[in-house]
Image (spheres, grey):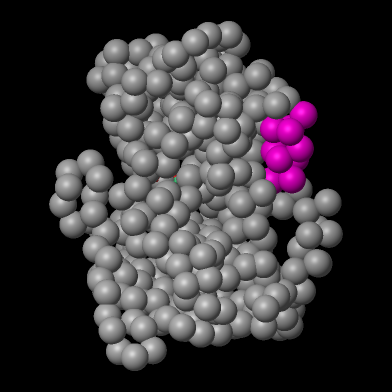
Amino acid sequence: MLPLNSAIIGCGAIFPMHAEALRQLPAARLAAVVDIDKTRAAAAAEQYDCRSYADYREMLQDETIQVVHICTPHYLHAEMALAALRRGKHVLTEKPMAIELADAAAMIRTARETGRQLGICFQNRYNATSLRIKALLDSGAAGKLIRARGSVRWHRDEAYYRSGDWRGTWAMEGGGVLINQAIHTLDLLQWFGGPIRDIRGEIATTGLQGVIEVEDTAQAAITFQNGAVATFSATNCHPVNDPVEIELECERLTLKLADGLTIETRDGQIERVEEINTATGEKSYWGMSHAVLIGHFYHCLETGQSFPIAGEDGLTALQMVLAIYRSSREQRAIPWEELALAAG
Ligand SMILES: NC(=O)c1ccc[n+]([C@@H]2O[C@H](COP(=O)([O-])OP(=O)(O)OC[C@H]3O[C@@H](n4cnc5c(N)ncnc54)[C@H](O)[C@@H]3O)[C@@H](O)[C@H]2O)c1
């Protein structure tokens, strides 16, 4: 019966993206918000005219809540998702789905056992540019992928890391630039070029030494099963936030994503695809597709279709991140099967 009653756990920085998306959706009604910070929860509840809780387990007792959005620090995603699924709720969780492979695998198993949907917020898959790249690859129009490049150069300073006690820690964030910021680009690279054969990588803490214990910089070579290699680099120590760059050299086309997408044919013809913010109609920047993703999640709940960015996709992205960490520690390429085994 529509609308579906939803709850959001975590009323911090990303909360408005979810709450505003729900406000626009006839299929959803924000019925409750949860935050251990009671002042935050109360302010959100007043703004969205809904109930507030300090303890998510209490909210989960409410049989009328059907969908739970998880917008909390990374280390809490698995425990909250598992509890919500076991109470019969559908779950849409922010990335990363978990910080440990075994937890991610348990979430996938529990979604299957309970027959509930588990969606992961990789909203950049819904960017017009990403969808066009995917269509050109899947239709065969681009030809076989030969090599790829991905680059994330963003600015996250000390003030950002001091804005939450979980940020910049192995125990609560689970890593740095890779698991938080660059995971979107890793997800896109494998969505375009996967499946993966192996990953070799290296991490370092450079400009944020003494501020964070995790990496602020990383690089990797991702070898796909078809033999194509993606070179990848990421940093949070750039002076400004540059547009994310992805370049795919294919048999028939070169696809360059930076500020919009440039499609080049072998005979030099060029087509541009701009990223348009569907909410405002204006030219958009990276990461404006949250509302589109959330709308599609509810459409899938309404129609009974499987949401396409499921637990398995969240697990793959987490495996990529953890492979780079392990490769950096052990100074060797990590074969994909090793990570599959670790996920159990
Ligand atoms: N998809 C994206 O592009 C995107 C962008 C930003 C953040 N995120 C993700 O969103 C999540 C939250 O990030 P943020 O920047 O909003 O963090 P934040 O620190 O601003 O907010 C987290 C909120 O969770 C609350 N919280 C902590 N423990 C809790 C508990 N046990 N029960 C209930 N509430 C609790 C905190 O009080 C805080 O209000 C992270 O997973 C982050 O990676 C995703």
Q: Is residue 85 left or right of residue 192?
A: right
Residue 109 drawn in magenta: yes
Q: Main secondary structure of the magenta part?
A: helix
Of residue 60 and residue 282, the one placed in the foreground of this image is: 282
Taking the spot 38% from the left edge, 89% from the top edge, the residue there is: 266
Q: Is residue 115 left or right of residue 12?
A: right
Looking at the image, is 69 positioned above or below residue 271? Answer: above
Of residue 43 and residue 70, the one placed in the foreground of this image is: 70
Taking the spot 26% from the left edge, 59% from the top edge, the residue there is: 275
Locate residue 238, reporting x and y percent.
Answer: 32, 74
Taking the spot 46% from the left edge, 62% from the top edge, the residue there is: 135
Locate residue 147, reporting x and y percent.
Answer: 53, 84
Locate residue 118, reporting x and y percent.
Answer: 60, 36
Instruction: Tell me the quarter of the picture where residue 211 sits.
Output: bottom left
Of residue 34 and residue 320, the one placed in the foreground of this image is: 320
Q: Is residue 299 left or right of residue 90?
A: left
Most distant residue in the bottom direction: 267
Q: Quadrant of ligand 1?
A: top left
Read off the magenta span: 103-113
Looking at the image, is 29 positioned above or below residue 237? Answer: above
Locate residue 17, reporting x and y percent.
Answer: 33, 38
Instruction: Tell me the quarter of the picture where residue 320 sits.
Output: bottom right
Residue 6 visible in rendering: yes
Taking the spot 64% from the left edge, 44% from the top edge, the residue there is: 311
Residue 40 visible in rendering: no
Of residue 47 and residue 243, the one placed in the foreground of this image is: 243
Residue 33 drawn in magenta: no
